Amino acid sequence: MLPHTPHATQIHAFLTCTLFVWMSVQTAAMSIADDGESPNTARPAYSQAVVAKADAILKDAGLRRSGKALQSTEAADFSRRLSGITRDRRELRLKQKAFTESESKLDVIESEISQLNRQDGELNLQLARVAGLDVTSNNRIVALINATRTQLAEMRKRRSAQKQVVQLARAKINEAEETYAESVFQARKQLDEMTQTIQQNLQDSQVRIAIDVMNANFDVAKEIDAETIVKALDSRLRDFEKEVFRESIPLDVSSGGSLFTMVSINQQAIRMVIDSGATLVTLPADAAAKLQVNVPDDAPVISLVLANGGKIDGRRVTLDSVRVGQFEAKNVDAVVLEPIAANAEPLLGLSFLDRYKFELDSASRTLGLLRIDNTDAETP
């Protein structure tokens, strides 16, 4: 034991301090060794002042640290933009659902009209069998025919009204789809610009030093690129993008100046003029025959006004499918012209075009089509 003298007291204090430091170093070395690192390779920890300076450099470069990762300082605002698109998608789904329901109601009316037409035909056959033979049966059948035709007239009025409902619902969808698609496209443009800016900033020497500081203190990856930084945002945006379908169809010009393209009707190809002034898809009789379009005997007769002011009759039919490019519509209303209109051009009219948001550009000779996937809206 050292004697109690001033000099001995100083030596004792020095030894105690030295021992404390030595024990602290050994404890730290053991801790590092437990983590699988050699004491000689321990990374330096920078001061809070240095970290604050690194934070400021990253902020000027549009970056910030979050845990062990780097994020864009625009990430929060962009995330809110994506949340807004999510709300737009919900509203669009409601419009798509309303449209699907209105179409279903129209299908029911069409089915009832077909049933009444068949009933009217059967009653007329019965009337022909008893004519002049059985007055009582004759009167009863005539009464049934009159009642059936009254019902038919009422159902046709309902069909006309419901078609207007469907048309209005489709117009609302087209407008909502265009707005939704534009929001998605603008979001992609912003994210691409953000990614490019971040990639450029990552090459800056000061930014690299700041990342080294964050790597030493917070284990932030030293080697990182812009795509990794925006990966989560990009993944969310891609979920929206995969629902948006847009195509620009190149068109040819006929000798008369009409724009036309190849169209698939009931899985068979035909050249058609794009005519946004035609209410229905229009087929000459010979073209309909080649396409094997069935024209029922009881198909409604409708009167059409031609471009030259003349009039011609046609039979209204429903086409199983009409496809242009990657855009295919089912159960498309059309008219098959009387054989007298042998020189008429097949027309791709609004009964197909209005299924989508479309843009006919005569200058660039293109037909732009847009649609948003509505699988969720069609699911019961």
Image: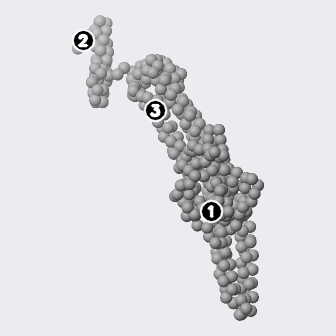
Q: Nearer the viewer, mark 1 or mark 3?
A: 1
Q: Residue at x 69, y 90 (%)?
A: 130
Q: Amino acid at mark 3?
A: Glu
Residue 263, given in percent of the width and then of the height, sits at 56, 52
Q: Is residue 142 above or below residue 43?
A: below
Q: Secondary structure at mark 3?
A: helix
Q: Which residue lies most toward the top here?
A: 7
Tag count in the figure?
Answer: 3
Residue at the location (52% across, 58% down)? 267
Q: Quadrant of the N terminus?
A: top left
Query: Residue 123's quadrant in the figure?
Result: bottom right
Distance between the Cα atoms at labels 1 and 3? 57 Å
Classify 34 as above or below 117: above
Residue 328 in view? no
Chain-order first, disc 1 or disc 3: 3
245 or 35, nearer to the observer: 245
Quadrant of image for the C terminus: bottom right
Of 290 and 322, nearer the camera is: 290
Q: Please name the colour scheme applied to the rendered image.
A: one colour
Mark 2: give few (<14), some (14-19) or many (20+) Cα within 10 Å.
few
Residue drawn where x is 58% and y is 67% of the image: 294
To which residue does mark 1 refer? 285
Q: Which residue is mark 2?
A: 2
Whichever of labels 3 and 2 marks the residue nearer the N terminus, that label is 2
Q: Residues within 10 Å of mark 1 (few under 14, many from 20)?
A: many
Secondary structure beneath dot 1 equals helix
Q: Is residue 191 above or below residue 164?
A: above
Q: Is residue 45 left or right of residue 35?
A: right
* Image location (x, y in percent) of residue 194: 53, 30
